[in-house]
Image (cartoon, rainbow, N blue to C red):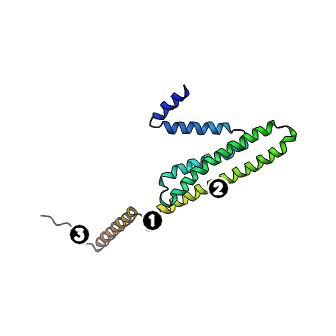
Amino acid sequence: SRARLVAAVERLPIGSGVLAEVRRVRSRVALRGTSAGQQWARLDRAALTLGGMANRLTGLAEPAVLEAAAADQSLRDLAARVASVERALRLAPTDARAPLAEAHGVLTAQLESGVAAYERLVVAAAGYLAEDARPETAHPAAARLTEATDLLHGVASALAELRAVGTPLRAPTR
């Protein structure tokens, strides 16, 4: 049965990730053709971007990651609600259409606002990562390479000066 198949896939090393992706795509397909579909796609891109950064968002950023997870679920629920109301609006008789259309408009505005706020959170998280990883001084490897380059330039310059004098240094031989 379906439950046994899901349980078997979940036991695989990558099973939970595969199932999450299948559920995500299934939900997105269910919203296709509705005004919530575009907002869902934006939310999905932002959530995947944040997911790629989440393990590096530690310390002061951890509460924001937890808040983002709750907001993500809430916005996905709101998107499903918007799509349901929109589908019902297509079936509604003329006299019932106006209040339903008004409710749909309010829900859609809430969804758009929420997705935009989520995207701003993702941008802020990326800024946090960039600033957290940026050292005040040059990277130690770059500093060592600069020193080695300067040393080689100095040796080359000294050899050129000695050659200009006409008496090249020779290594002592035995």
User: Residue lying farthest top?
Assistant: 1
Residue at the spot of label 3: 169
Residue at 58%, 48% in the rendered image? 47
Residue at the spot of label 2: 117
Q: Position of residue 129 (x, y in %)?
A: 51, 59
The mark nearer the N terminus, 1 or 2, is 2
- Regarding mark 1 in the picture, which secondary structure is present there? loop
Residue type for callout 1: Pro
- Between the C-alphas of marks 3 and 1, the distance is 43 Å
Residue at 84%, 42% in the rendered image? 97
- Regarding mark 3 in the picture, which secondary structure is present there? loop
Foreground of the two, 129 or 172 = 129
The mark nearer the N terminus, 3 or 1, is 1
- Where residue 92 is drawn, which disc sits there? none
Disc 3, disc 1: CB below 8 Å? no
- 3 vs 2, front mark: 2
Disc 3, disc 2: CB below 8 Å? no
Residue at the spot of label 1: 135
Asked if residue 77 lies left or right of residue 60, the reply is right
User: Residue lying farthest right?
Assistant: 95
Residue type for callout 3: Leu
Residue at 48%, 62% in the rendered image? 132
- 3 vs 1, front mark: 1
Mark 1 residue crowding within 10 angstroms, few (<14) / some (14–19) / many (20+): few
Screen quadrant of the N terminus: top right
Residue type for callout 2: Ala
